[in-house]
Image (cartoon, rainbow, N blue to C red):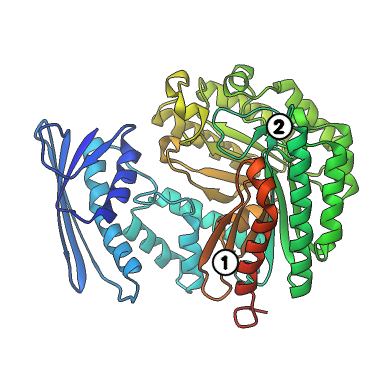
């Protein structure tokens, strides 16, 4: 779809206009000139004084015309960035409206293209705005539908039940530990994940750097008297390394980190069933880690083969039962809606198989075409369901979880996600992942250790977020882990200085 935009010369509009166009059209091109090559032309009229007045008129090649107007008071701010954000949202409001009218497609998340919509509702709760008024504001400002606002409210309620002190955890931190190895790389994946076979030298070097980071960071936390809320081992697949290597890693955690017995939750992703063994489960049990993920993604064998997962459906089920027998009492499983070749029958089958296991939590992802993934680079090889079928599969997941006693407790969205939908974590009551809440709502600093691990440093006073990422490939990490560790500690020193510390 070729879209001509007239009347918005500021280049800062380019990205939001493109992102919203992508919600409607698989391939869209935006240009700012009048031309015969355009499929549709949209003329904007924008006026900004004490309030924002904006109108848009869409004309199609077949002479159909759609128009929209919007106005809102402009909130006084010293920040040019915040001022432009208000203008951008007003422009997005009329832009989305004329595109919805033209296509007949309603975008349930309105103009939102960001990852964390529930943060908007949390902010209104913290400001003391009553729920009904908050809902009306979300609907008016962002065009979010009642259905999605209700989902946001359910999640916010659940999070505040699970973590009643959610808004006052700035004085603590959580820790993410990235293990960048997997048996194989999945076709949809862009996480730092390297096939582990034949890489033992890289693994040894990487683990040496990770132990160093854990020692240094743990010493800093002890010195400053800062407690850890949650620890999450992700990747890659953290259970790709050997049982002995896992044992030494968790011993390092208990030795280096402060008050490990008071950490609210420690999670280890064992997402690939082909990495789980009795020996590794014994190690987890030894170190009192009982929250793990075992991720089927699908219970259709042909699908697993197509996306590059080299385990079998039977192996997933067998490893789940093995983990149960060996004392894992909080197991998460992931399913993905819209995998290649899958429609409603295959997804229904996956839900039916999940019913036989009843894990404590179920995360339902919607497939996203991530820019660097094998699937995106070779789209023609991977046939996926259309928007209507994807929405029906999401509805199946919502109905299934509700009827089986699961409640939604976190969600996030991604660019290029099928059907402009979302990923939702459901759990049985009191089995929620606290780490998932922390990472999505960005209420506290999360320190990333290991290869590809991203840190988010949240200023305890202003809430401003500073990002820092370790390199994704093991060689670069091994070459520079000391420098990355020092850089993180320097940022932490500034955040938790006497002046800035909330303690």
Which x, y percent locates residue 324? 83, 37
Q: Quadrant of the N terminus?
A: top left
The residue sitting at the bottom extreme is 499
Q: Quadrant of the C terminus?
A: bottom right
Q: Residue at x 60, y 47 (%)?
A: 471
Closest to the observer, 304 or 374 = 374
The residue sitting at the front extreme is 479
Report helix, strand or loop for mark 1. strand
Q: Residue at x 62, y 22 (%)?
A: 304
Q: Is 453 situated left or right of 35 in this image?
A: right
Mark 2 or 1, closer to the camera: 1
Mark 2 Cα-neighbour bin, 10 Å: few <14, some 14–19, many ≥20: many
Q: Residue at x 76, y 62 (%)?
A: 216
- Spatial CA distance of label 2 from label 1 is 32 Å
Q: Is 482 situated left or right of 424 in this image?
A: right
Q: Residue at x 21, y 34 (%)?
A: 2
User: Which mark, residue 458?
Assistant: 1
Q: Is residue 371 above or below residue 386?
A: below
Q: Is 473 situated left or right of 147 in this image?
A: right
Q: Which residue is disc 2 drawn over?
A: 272
> Does residue 391 appear in this view?
yes
The disc, 2 or 1, on the residue closer to the chain's N-terminal end is 2
Q: Is residue 259 above or below residue 345?
A: below
> Does residue 288 appear in this view?
no
Quadrant for residue 441, please give it. Answer: bottom right
Which x, y percent locates residue 53? 18, 63
Q: So how many labels did they put on this image?
A: 2
Report helix, strand or loop for mark 2. loop
Q: Is 499 situated left or right of 264 in this image?
A: left
Which x, y percent locates residue 283? 88, 42
Mark 1 Cα-neighbour bin, 10 Å: few <14, some 14–19, many ≥20: many
Which x, y percent locates residue 117? 46, 54
């Amino acid at each position: 779809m070729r879209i001509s935009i007239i009347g918005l010369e500021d280049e800062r509009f380019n990205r939001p206009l493109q992102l919203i166009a992508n919600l409607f059209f698989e391939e869209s091109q935006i240009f700012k000139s009048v031309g015969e090559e355009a499929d549709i032309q949209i003329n904007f009229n924008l006026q900004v004084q004490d309030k924002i007045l904006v109108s848009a008129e869409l004309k199609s090649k077949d002479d159909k015309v759609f128009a929209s107007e919007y106005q809102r008071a402009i909130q006084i701010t010293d920040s040019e960035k915040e001022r432009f954000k208000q203008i951008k949202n007003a422009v997005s409001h009329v832009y989305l409206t004329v595109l919805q009218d033209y296509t007949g497609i309603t975008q349930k998340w309105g103009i939102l293209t960001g990852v964390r919509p529930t943060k908007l509702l949390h902010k209104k709760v913290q400001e003391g705005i009553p729920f009904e008024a908050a809902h009306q504001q979300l609907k008016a400002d962002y065009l979010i539908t009642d259905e999605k606002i209700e989902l946001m409210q359910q999640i916010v309620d659940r999070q505040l039940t699970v973590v009643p002190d959610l808004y006052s955890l700035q004085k603590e931190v959580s820790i993410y530990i990235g293990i960048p190895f997997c048996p194989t790389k999945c076709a949809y994946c862009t996480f730092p994940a390297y096939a582990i076979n034949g890489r033992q030298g890289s693994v040894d070097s990487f683990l040496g750097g990770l132990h160093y980071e854990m020692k240094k960071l743990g010493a800093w936390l002890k010195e400053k008297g800062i407690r850890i809320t949650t620890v999450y081992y992700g990747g890659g697949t953290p259970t790709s390394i050997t049982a002995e290597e896992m044992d030494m890693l968790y011993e390092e955690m208990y030795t280096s980190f402060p008050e490990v017995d008071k950490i609210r939750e420690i999670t280890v992703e064992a997402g690939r069933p082909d990495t789980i063994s009795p020996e590794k489960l014994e190690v987890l049990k030894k170190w009192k880690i009982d929250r793990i993920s075992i991720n089927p993604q699908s219970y259709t064998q042909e699908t697993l083969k197509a996306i590059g997962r080299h385990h079998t459906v039977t192996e997933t089920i067998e490893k789940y039962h093995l983990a149960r027998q060996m004392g894992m009492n909080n197991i998460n499983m992931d399913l993905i809606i819209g995998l290649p070749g899958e429609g409603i029958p295959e997804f229904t089958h996956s839900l039916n198989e999940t019913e036989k296991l009843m894990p404590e939590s179920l995360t339902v992802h919607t497939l996203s075409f991530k820019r660097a993934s094998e699937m995106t680079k070779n789209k023609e090889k991977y046939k996926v369901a259309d928007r209507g079928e994807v929405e029906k599969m999401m509805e199946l997941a919502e109905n299934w979880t509700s009827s089986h006693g699961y409640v939604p407790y976190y969600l996030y969205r991604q660019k290029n996600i099928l059907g402009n939908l979302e990923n939702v974590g459901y759990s049985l009551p009191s089995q929620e992942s606290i780490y998932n809440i922390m990472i999505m709502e960005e209420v506290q600093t999360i320190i990333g250790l290991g290869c590809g691990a991203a840190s988010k440093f949240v200023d305890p006073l202003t809430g401003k977020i500073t990002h820092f990422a370790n390199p994704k490939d093991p060689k670069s990490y091994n070459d520079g882990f000391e420098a990355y560790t020092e850089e993180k500690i320097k940022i932490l020193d500034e955040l938790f200085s006497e002046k800035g510390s909330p303690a």
